[in-house]
Image (spheres, rainbow, N blue to C red):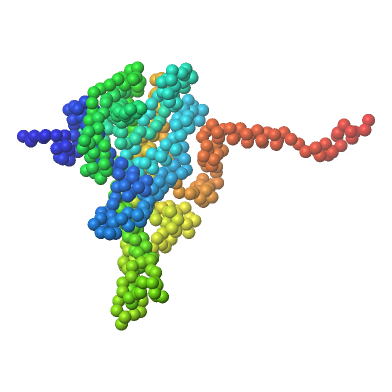
């Protein structure tokens, strides 16, 4: 029978699923748990890459030449080529560049549709999707939480003992930092969660010291359980095994949470936390980010740019050679900025020692590396307006036919559809939960419906071409009502579209009710024309 000395040895088995028989968040344990450190280190490491702070994580060129005189110069010349930013931001732009519409499938004036419109508007759902997709691009995982409460934080007023204003309670959809989420998978189904723990470190700073605490918010179907523990830093509590210096704490005694109740029923028999992977596989719950496969390539691009810049800087101040110079107080006085190598008088022609460093090959390699990055990222390089190198044919803007444009955009469109699949499920679940929370805790009484989301592919549409196609297919019959046309054209909701229609109707009535004064001068039946 096999025996294991630690949880780390269990993880070395690389099993699909590991079930722990005790709580990871309790006194004596370490935080973050061992099983989650690689994931959290990846989040933090790739965030530095996204922020353009590669020098804080990657030092390949400097490390290679660290024992040479060039090391200090390379550090000063470091250039961060932040391709990671545009690679993960562009899918977010295309996903919600044209805002999606959220439909209940019921009439516009129904309670359900009015409620869905309210959730979308008050939670800035389109903005939330864009921010989440951007962060998800480098992490691979995103989480949103639905709760019923106040949108405004009144905790400081409570601390000061001030009188609270009337608190408006409503369903709220908000982000959760992925590095603070620790899900527990269901037995036999690694894609399903039986509980989700949200654990955050809080430093309480006083005039004399600072103390870290661990706040745990444990979500199970129908309930939220709150716990709070004292944390302690300790010597050697930095885990660098996965490329990032991750702070590790020891969990101390349990302390009061400061809440009135530590076990709160939600009134909804579902988890209020929703997972959104960037790309997923069937044997792991963790998502795959858009930068994970590009780390080495992006680091190589930075190194190549630094090397090229170093060569060009050296060539701007090259070493000279020539006859021996009189550096005394005589008439011959030569001042050079670079080094000078004296040679014999037989070879008296001065010259410079050029260091080409095979720049042509270096630039060629740089072009290949950049092309590989965009290929692996499924993003056409010309999507950003220009293409480097010899393979710069076609900017993607010479086609006016929508089918041709979509064919050119096919790689990024396919990527957007894949990302959309995960966001569609999580957002529809969140809007469904919002209705249940409104019914359970608010004054609303309606039958909840599972909404649908109408997404756009982000590619500009040729509206004239679409109208012509519809006219051909329907025999020139109308294919859209006025309200839907206004909604799509102006990107507004049903209520705003109805207001616009009402104003249009009012304008038409005023126009129909006004007559030209010249009609009174026509005909002979008027009062002043009869003759009495």
Task: Confirm whether residue 286 shows in the render.
Answer: no
**Which quadrant holds residue 32?**
top left
Residue 329 visible in image: yes
Locate residue 441, reporting x and y percent.
Answer: 41, 20
Quick one: which residue is furthest to the left in this view?
A: 1
Find the residue positioned furthest to the front. 329
- Kindly identify the residue that appears in the image at 37 percent across and 48 percent down: 52
- Residue 35 position in % (x across, y down): 21, 36
Identify the residue at the far right of this view. 532
Of residues 65 and 457, which is closer to you in this image?
A: 65
Point 39% across, 54% down: residue: 380
- Nearest the viewer among 297 and 136 is 297
Along the horizontal axis of the image, is 330 left or right of 529? left
Q: Is residue 471 left or right of residue 340?
A: right
Considering the image in quadrants, where does the N terminus appear? top left
> In the rendering, at what x and y percent does residue 525 appear?
86, 34
Residue at the farthest bottom position: 346
Figure disc tally: 0
Query: Which residue occupies 25% across, 45% down?
Result: 243
Query: Residue 473 at x, y = what percent?
Result: 50, 47
| Residue in front for this viewpoint, 430 or 498 | 430
Question: Taking 64 as reference, is 132 above or below it?
Answer: above
Question: Which quadrant of the structure image shows residue 44?
Answer: top left
Q: Considering the image in quadrants, where does the C terminus appear?
A: top right
Residue at left offset 93%, top offset 33%:
531
């Amino acid at each position: 029978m096999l025996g294991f000395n630690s949880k780390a040895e269990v993880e070395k088995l690389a099993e699909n699923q590991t079930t722990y028989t005790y709580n990871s968040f309790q006194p004596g344990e370490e935080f973050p748990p061992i099983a989650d450190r690689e994931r959290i280190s990846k989040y933090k490491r790739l965030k530095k890459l996204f922020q353009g702070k590669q020098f804080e994580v990657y030092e390949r060129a400097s490390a290679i030449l660290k024992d040479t005189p060039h090391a200090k110069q390379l550090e000063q010349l470091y250039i961060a080529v932040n391709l990671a930013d545009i690679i993960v931001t562009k899918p977010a732009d295309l996903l919600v560049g044209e805002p999606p519409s959220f439909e209940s499938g019921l009439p516009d004036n129904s309670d359900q549709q009015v409620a869905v419109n309210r959730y979308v508007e008050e939670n800035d759902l389109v903005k939330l999707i864009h921010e989440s997709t951007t962060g998800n691009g480098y992490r691979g995982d995103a989480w949103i939480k639905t709760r019923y409460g106040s949108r405004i934080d009144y905790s400081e007023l409570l601390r000061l003992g001030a009188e609270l204003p009337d608190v408006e309670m409503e369903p709220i959809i908000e982000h959760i930092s992925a590095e603070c989420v620790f899900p527990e998978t269901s037995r036999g189904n690694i894609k399903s969660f039986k509980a989700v723990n949200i654990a955050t470190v809080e430093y309480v700073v006083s005039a004399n010291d600072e103390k870290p605490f661990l706040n745990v918010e444990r979500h199970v179907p129908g309930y939220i359980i709150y716990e709070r523990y004292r944390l302690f830093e300790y010597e050697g509590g930095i885990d660098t095994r996965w490329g990032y210096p991750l702070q590790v704490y020891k969990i101390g005694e349990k302390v009061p949470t400061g809440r009135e109740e530590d076990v709160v029923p939600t009134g909804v028999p579902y988890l209020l936390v929703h997972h959104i992977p960037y790309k997923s596989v069937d044997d792991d719950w963790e998502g795959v980010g858009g930068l994970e496969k590009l780390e080495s390539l992006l680091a190589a691009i930075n190194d190549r740019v630094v090397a090229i810049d170093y060569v060009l800087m050296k060539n701007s101040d090259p070493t000279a050679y020539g006859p021996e110079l009189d550096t005394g107080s005589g008439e011959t006085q030569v001042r050079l900025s670079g080094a000078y190598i004296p040679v014999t008088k037989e070879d008296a022609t001065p010259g410079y020692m050029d260091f080409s460093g095979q720049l042509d090959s270096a630039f060629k390699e740089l072009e290949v590396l950049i092309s590989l990055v965009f290929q692996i990222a499924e993003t056409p390089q010309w999507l950003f307006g220009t293409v480097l190198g010899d393979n710069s044919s076609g900017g993607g803007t010479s086609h006016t036919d929508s089918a041709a444009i979509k064919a050119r955009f096919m790689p990024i469109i396919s990527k957007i559809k894949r990302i959309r699949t995960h966001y569609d499920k999580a957002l529809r679940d969140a809007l469904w939960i919002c209705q249940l929370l409104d019914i359970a805790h608010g004054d609303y009484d309606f039958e909840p419906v599972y909404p649908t989301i109408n997404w756009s592919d982000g590619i500009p549409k040729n509206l004239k071409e679409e109208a012509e196609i519809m006219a051909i297919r329907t025999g020139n019959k109308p294919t859209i009502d006025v309200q839907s046309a206004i909604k799509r054209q102006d990107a507004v909701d049903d209520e705003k579209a109805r207001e616009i229609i009402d104003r249009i109707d009012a304008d038409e009535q005023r126009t129909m009710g006004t007559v030209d004064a010249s009609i009174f001068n026509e005909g002979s039946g008027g009062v002043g024309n009869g003759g009495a």
